[in-house]
Image (cartoon, grey):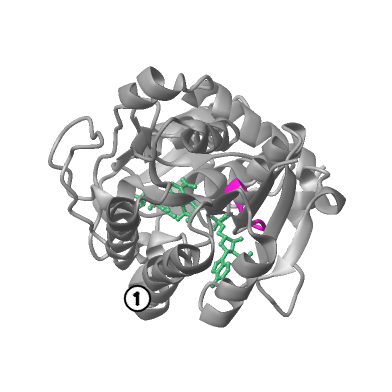
Amino acid sequence: MKKAFITGITGQDGSWLAKYLIQKNYKVYGGMRRTSTVNLWRLDFLDIRNKVELVEFDLLDYSNVFNTIKTLRPDEFYNLAAQSFVGTSFKQPISTSMIDGMGVAYILDALHTIAPETKFYQASTSEMYGKVRDIPQKESTPFHPRSPYGCAKVYAHWMTVNYRESYDMFATSGILFNHESELRGPEFVTRKITINVAGWKMGKKEPLELGNLDSERDWGYAKEYVEGMHLMLQADKPDTFVLATGQKTKIRTFAEKAFHAIDRGIVWEGSGEDEKGYDAKTRELLVKINPKFYRPAEVDLLIGDASKAKEVLGWSYKTGIEELTQIMVKSDINLLA
Ligand code: NDP
Ligand code: GDP
């Protein structure tokens, strides 16, 4: 039985990956940091809480990182732990840099010292492209991060490449474009929208407050992206791979699709901070702007080219934006029912 260790097991991708690896007959260990309130709702949602072995793990504690690796000696190590929210990274740039950047150096150093045969996956991100230099973005596109989160992830990506090149370690970096699901954190814009839309469906009529409606993202389904992570560690050699759909959608279009899923149309009126979205039939106020959700520096457009993953790994996305929106809205309605 192969052993996998997943950091960030309580997060969106950690839980989907754990479920996937359990189905593949792996022994799955999950790193979980001590919090004052236990946070296992995603593992419960997927009904796998008792099928993973949870171990105390905090990326910021080198002795904890070292001893966990020494004790478990996993065949595959998936580093999914991060302060993953761009907005928060502007408010907490130092802790974000420590977790998302330095934390990865801790893991790589510990693996190099005591378990160099372990295959390592680093959760890199399209946010590294930031102010994009190519459209679409691929593995060779230069980085220009636009947030402390993006900067820390660039450091972690290059450390992964550096350990691969310096020590011949199987260290792979997956540059994943945004991927969402029923388990997405509620602070991310897609889930924030689908939770609000579910509220409208169930009679809780609160206008949705958003920031920039015109940025564009390449959104895929997280459940499929974790399969790509696993494929990357089964490849002949360590490398860097982009996972994306190659389709882009504006925030306002995602909101329209989500309201459409409960049979409401939006008409937009006004501009800038005064723009508002009304129900096309009832004229109820559905969406308004709250500038507090604007970011100090924005990433206007992300759209990825995943042809290398298709060619080398045989991976490509299946669920498009329409279906993804339906899945998320339906799930949030069920959670409220
Ligand atoms: P989540 O925010 O849902 O999960 C992050 C996880 O990291 C949580 O389990 C969290 O634990 C854990 N964590 C945070 N800090 C620490 C720490 N100091 N020590 C140990 N664990 C910690 O993120 P996702 O699942 O969406 O993303 C997974 C990874 O992929 C992240 O690295 C993210 O940056 C990256 N990524 C995500 C994309 C996406 O669209 N989802 C796109 C590209 C990259 P706790 O529950 O205690 O907070
Ligand atoms: P990100 O791509 O990792 O930053 O994912 P998010 O879901 O947090 O943000 C995606 C885009 O939506 C960014 O361009 C945000 O500026 C934009 N956005 C607009 N309104 C909101 C909002 O209310 N919350 C969030 N999280 N993002 C918003």
The amino acid type, in three-letter code, at marker 1 is Pro
Tell me the quadrant of the picture where the N terminus can be found.
Answer: top right
Up-down relation of residue 159 to residue 180 (above or below): below
Please, what is the dominant secondary structure of the magenta stretch? loop
Q: Is residue 130 left or right of residue 187?
A: left
Residue visible at 25% across and 46% down in the picture:
271
Residue visible at 40% across and 32% down in the picture:
253
Tell me the quadrant of the picture where the C terminus can be found.
Answer: top right
Up-down relation of residue 109 to residue 328 (above or below): below
| Residue 116 percent coordinates (x, y) | 48, 57
Residue visible at 56% across and 53% down in the picture:
77
| Residue 37 percent coordinates (x, y) | 75, 75
Does residue 244 appear in the picture of this structure? yes
Magenta residue check for 262: no
| Residue 328 percent coordinates (x, y) | 62, 35
Q: Is residue 203 left or right of residue 280?
A: right
Q: Is residue 141 left or right of residue 304?
A: left
Residue visible at 35% across and 35% down in the picture:
242
| Residue 24 percent coordinates (x, y) | 72, 32
Q: Identify which residue, 276 or 128, lies in the foreground.
A: 128
Is the C-beta of the residue carrying label 1 under 8 Å from the nearest atom of ligand 1?
Answer: no
Residue ID for mark 1: 93
Magenta residue check for 11: yes
Q: Which residues are magenta?
A: 9-13
Tell me which corner region of the image, top left, top right, bottom left or bottom right, holds residue 23. Answer: top right
Tell me which corner region of the image, top left, top right, bottom left or bottom right, holds residue 201. Answer: top right
Judged from this view, the residue extending furthest toward the right is: 50
Judged from this view, the residue extending furthest toward the left is: 133
Does residue 280 appear in the picture of this structure? no
Q: Residues within 10 Å of mark 1 (few under 14, many from 20)?
A: some
